[in-house]
Amino acid sequence: MIRFIVRRIVAAFFVMIAVTIITFLLLAATGNQAARLAGKNATQQQIHQIAAQYGLDKPIYVQYVKTMKNIFTGKAYSYTQNINVLQEVKHDYPATLSLAFGAGIIWLGLSVLFGTLAAVYAGRTTDRVLTILSMAGVSFPPFFLGAIFLYFLGYKLGWFPLGGYVGLSDPWQWFKHLVLPWITLSILFIGFYSRVLRSTILDNTNEDYVRTAHAKGLTDGQVLRRHTLRNSMIPIISLWGLDMGQLLGGAAILTDSVFNLQGVGQLAATAIANLDVITIMVIVILTAFAVVLLSAIVDILYAVLDPRIRLA
Amino acid sequence: MSEPAARSNGDAPLLTVDGLKVSFATEDGVVRAVDGVSFTVDPGEVVAIVGESGSGKSVTAMTLMGLTRGPNARFEGTATFDGIELVGASNAQLQRIRGPGIAMVFQDPMSSLDPVYRVGAQIVEQIRAHENVSKAQAMDRAVEMMERVGIPRAKQRLRSYPHEFSGGMRQRVMIAMALSCSPKLLLADEPTTALDVTIQAQILQEMRDLRQQTGAGVILVTHDLGVVADIADRVIVMYSGRVVEQGTLDDIFYNPQHPYTWGLLGSIPRIDDNRAEKLPAIPGLPPSVLRAPKGCHFRPRCPHAFDKCVEVPELERRQPDVPTSRDRCWLSVPDKKRLRVVGERIGLETTETVGA
């Protein structure tokens, strides 16, 4: 088990290095950055000057090493605004973390509940109602749902604040500000996850080992909990890990922006609008790191859930 | 079956199946998987149910455990085990019977154990589902059971996962699990089909020993007549959902009455047979369970079929001097004796026809 974990972490490390290289090359390929920074009417001389200032005239591998060094020593400054990108990300990160984990727990819990109910009552009314609700949930974009929630529950009824983020130092306010974003983001995932779980459970119901479990004289509930559900959670956990990785990297751009949480998602939205290359790169790398890290964690979890994986 | 099968002893049978019918509603129509099956099993007796794939032998066994229940399944007839009627039993009743009453070993040991639990935990789960014992006590019993079915280093192997076992060892785990609650009746559904021949022999030996030690009744579902000859006391031959013949092991092997049984026996490759021909086989395919032929189900494949065969023959005693044998064939007993031997062996290969 220990060897498995070590091997997994080493592999994750190499994947991360590959991601930084690819991200860097892609952004370098977007065009002459010095010319873009110099503005529309800049002279050739001004462009050269800017290129020299930012080191953009150096060979690409030198640029890569220098940029990476800056990012990992906390000295990555945005070209467009003279701000330290890492400081910015650090400042915005608690909001992103709170949003992702809160929503992640809610959607995982509710998906397991709804998915199991739908599978147990497959073909009956409960299943049909849940199917319709899932489809509706998947179909509502967060900016629409978020706006509806803000208008009715926030503005009309005044139950919740109208957006913004409050740090954990005031837990009650933190919670109140996050309830609507959590629900909005969760609804997007619950529909999909519960459909996946439902069909996995139904597939597993026909497995031989489930028949064995019945033949042992276990109750239907015991068979479901100990055997069918346990085996059906494996794909759900890997989905969850990948989605959490993305969200921890700031992928909840819409929810973040609608509720003005000023998390990494909102930072990304602004950076993209301003073609702020360094900020975009830091966020892409952050997302990649989060995904790689989470999938490493998920692989380890996976091995706990499914002993056969440990051989691979 | 109205007439009870003759038995060697006078005790009540452990299991009495009477007129069992199982059908499934499918999109293509109603599948009559089991069409009126009756038999008994005594304590300590091994009854083999043989037949081709789709003959209803597995469905019969699983129905006794209530494992074929579902929204599309219909049942008729009765199966009385130890005074309890199984076909109409409630789920709670069945759950109590599964394990200490009737236990089952399935065909495919590779997929019949839950991949995510250690084998010890799976045996312990079986024990603790029925007995109020501590985990440690159940563990000790699991080790004991594993040793009994010939798993070496049982104490360490308890902590292994199913994928760390070979097929033969997994099947031993299944048997250990099935026997851990000391069942009165063991259903073995092709327990050796997925295994090597050498492992097969070992597993059969284990089952023989266990029957001797525990006195449990055994229903062995198989299509392997070699296995049947090895272990069975009585044999039930099923074809297309019906019992076509039943009798003692000797009745079936030395004095078979139904042409289908002749075909089965004739299909066994013989080691003393030096003809380099292709393997003997029963011509044709088993009928679709959706559109079974009228009358005797074997009629379309039977070279000896005649006018009378469009009526369903009853499963009854047809040889006055053999009280244990029953069959469903209209041919007269002397005709059967004459027709079944081809050359030096029993089989179906013939072009002879029989007048009405």
Image (cartoon, coloured by chain):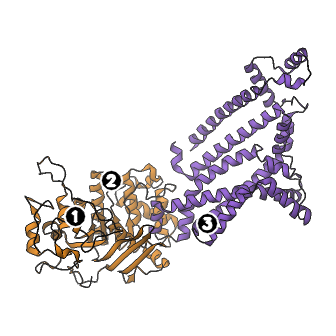
Chain colours: A purple, B orange
Q: Is residue A268 left or right of residue B261?
A: right
Q: Give the letter of the chain under mark 3.
A: A
Q: Give the letter of the chain under mark 2.
A: B
From where the camera sits, is residue B38 visible?
yes
Q: Is residue A143 left or right of residue B158?
A: right
The answer as to whether the residues below labels 3 and 2 share one chain is no
Kindly check if marks 1 and 2 are in contact, taking CB atoms under 8 A apart as contact: no
Q: Amino acid at mark 3?
A: Ala
Q: Is residue B97 above or below residue A105?
A: below
Q: Who's the residue at 75% across and 38% down the image?
A: A286
Kindly check if marks 3 and 2 are in contact, taking CB atoms under 8 A apart as contact: no
From where the camera sits, is residue B99 visible?
no
Within 10 Å of disc 2 (Cα), the crowding (few <14, some 14-19, many 20+) is many
| Residue matched to label 2 | B195
| Residue matched to label 1 | B301
Q: Nearer the viewer, residue B163 or A197?
A: A197
Quarter in which the N terminus of chain B is drawn? bottom left
Q: Nearer the viewer, residue B106 or B134?
A: B106
Q: Which quadrant holds residue B103?
A: bottom left
Q: Is residue A134 left or right of residue A159?
A: left
State the residue lying farthest toward the top: A45
Q: CA distance from mark 1 to mark 3?
A: 47 Å
